[in-house]
Amino acid sequence: MKKYIIQSLRLTGVLMVLLCIIYPVAIAYIGKLSPGAGSGEKVLKNGKVVGYARIGQSFTKPEYFWGRPSAVGYNAAGSGGSNKGPTNADYLKQVSERIDTLLKYHPYLKKSDIPADMVTASGSGLDPDISETAAIMQIKRVAAYRKLSDRTVAELVLKNTEGPLFGLFGPSKVNVLKLNVALDELKK
Amino acid sequence: MNTELLGIIATYAITLLIGIPLGIYLAKMFAGEKVWTDFLKPLEKGIYKLSGINPEESMNWKQHMKALLMINMVWLVYGFFALLYQDKLPLNPDGNLGQSPDLAFNSIISFVVNCNLQHYSGETGATYFTQHFVFMFLQFVSAATGIAAAVVLFKAFRDKTTTNLGNFWVFFTCSITRLLLPLSIVVATILAFNGTPTSYEGKDQFISLQGDTVQVSRGPAAGFVAIKHLGTNGGGWFGANGAHPLENPNYLSNMVEVISQVIIPIAMVFAFGYFIRRKKMAWVIFGIMTLGMMLLLVPTVISETGGSPNIAKMGVSQLTGAMEGKEVRFGATATAYWSTVTTIISTGSINSMHDSAMPLTGMYQLIAMMMNCFYGGCGVGILNYFIFIIIAVFISGLMVGRTPEFLGHKVEAREVKIASIIALLHPFIILVGTALAAYTVTNFPDADWLVKPASWLNNPGFHGFSEMLYETTSAAANNGSGFEGLGDNNMFWNVMTGFVLLLGRFLPIIGPVAIAGLLASKKYIPESAGTLKTDTLTFGVMTFVVIVIIAALAFFPALTLGPLAEHFSMIK
């Protein structure tokens, strides 16, 4: 029995060096070669960092495309979803209020034009993307506030739509931050 | 065909293309035959030498279990204190606090037992030191513990009669050096190139496009996320786990993560068959496990892509399915696939919030964890399935009026007793734990804990009951996912699930290994016309029926009170 204790302690120590020091440090060096150099890919506007490509931001101003509702208010120091169940009455009321708000800012929409992702909170609370439909429904509003033609904005949305992986797998999506940066840069 | 469906078909196909050859490789490697990774032998020799281990020493099943329990005990004690005092240890750039005693008790158990329940959030409840030297370390070694235990069982059926079952330290070490570590390096590299951070920098701060000041938690997550999936651990670097855009940046990373959690469980099935030189048996077991998975996967995909009936009533478009708690980059189909995989395998990582899934989806997730043997966790999946094989052998033996035998060894009262106890233990701890929780909520709503029982539940009614049932089931199955709305960081849940976790881990490891050890020491009876063949499809179906009947009888009432009641109240 005593033999096993000593072997356990020694093996634990040896493996810690391999698994907790050598392995992650090696990965950290490999990560330095990756696009974001291992610290997360950043998005620049006029050479200034305005965020992380993968981390969603809160957009409330009418001249920007909006992202999805977030249970953590896009505070990326933490993360999390609403964890509301599908039959929770308070939650359903909240969803219906979100629909009303969207209709108020987009008077040209019918309810059936609104996709579910615009009225439901994401799992991480930091979802950087919206669906194609969610971007398309906002075009008129953004164009009006920016005094641009619908067509210019629509073209920008199309340009910023990422299709399925290899054109085959998974959904299409629009990165809200990148789209909004592209909008701001258009103005110049 | 739609691209979302095509995505999960490709994902499953790639899983098989990797998993099956990996199993054959593992069988050869553990049998000591020549494999291409033999160049790592000097590394292993070094590890044995530094640890004072003689790799030639052979153990019987009891010695195996002693070694296994001893090293697990060492990790429990060490990790408990490391978490308690993590604020005083190095590598804490964000200045996080030490864990409370009950939280540390729960966290350390749940990582030692390969569960990763995580009643804390990675961003605030752990430091870079504990993330590496406790959590990631345990993700490697707890997976290796499960695999090593399974190899002991394999070894028992390779030879006709034997008490020599190899060396535990060798199985354990090789699981890391020949399997988990090399694969982790590959997966971590892919993740790093898709945007998962790898550097040790702390939180970053920037001004957003709209002018808000925002903080972002970061840290070397890629290596952690790789082993958390390969080792079917599931504990996230960030609180939101695989839904977090830095842990799981895009559809490709999602495919890689969901593939990497299934390949070892599938490989273990083939490793078993090839190791004991009964390939057909591997295919039968694999077939039944796949049937179980499909029966849960297909309705889950239908239920999630169909959208929420309550939101449909409001008139918005649900072409992309139910989206609460889901991420746009994965879509409802890949999310449904992940949720099935993570619950049949004991991974428990999530790429969506299970609490917000449709009631029936929640039920499929629960059933997956209640059966806990369709592929199952690293090593322990095949051990759990083995228990059901023994029960099926016994019942079939009774039905045809012959002495039950498995692979040439008589299955007698002692083995069947052990198998029954282990099979019934799982429903027992789940139902008792859930009952205790429900009793506490109703009778002591104001108990003075960190979270009062009155505020445990994030959702009223049937769904609230499901939250408690899910948490206990997840603990018993060593899964680690949760209906995360539950206020679980308090004395009751930390201590209760702590005990459930221990029982749900070590007894289902000791039981099957004991049965295998006992059987292997018995006289070998050559196959004859009267032998019940255990590698036929008929026997496979028999095992499946046993699994379904035990689960249905034990869990149907609880499922009725939770997800079923919620579903029917929703569609009425």
Image: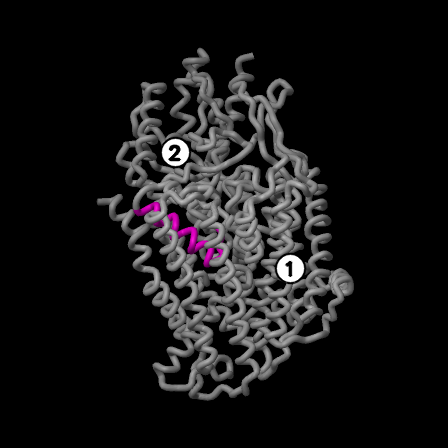
Residue at (68, 43) in percent of width and height: B89
Instruction: Determine the residue located farthest toward the left in the rendered image.
Output: B572
Residue B381 spot, x, y in % from top left: 50, 63
Residue A57 horizontal side relative to residue A110, left or right: right
Q: Which residue is mark 1?
A: B74
Q: With respect to residue B373, does B5 lie above or below?
A: above
Q: Quadrant of residue A181?
A: top right
- Give the chain of mark 2: A
Residue at (37, 54) in percent of width and height: B364
Q: With respect to residue B42, does B90 lie above or below?
A: above
Q: CA distance from mark 1 to mark 2?
A: 45 Å
Residue B266 spot, x, y in % from top left: 52, 61
Position of the C terminus of chain A, as image quadrant, is top right
Give the residues in magenta: B462-480
Q: Mark 2 belongs to which amino acid?
A: Thr
- Give whichever of B72, B328 is nearer the camera: B72
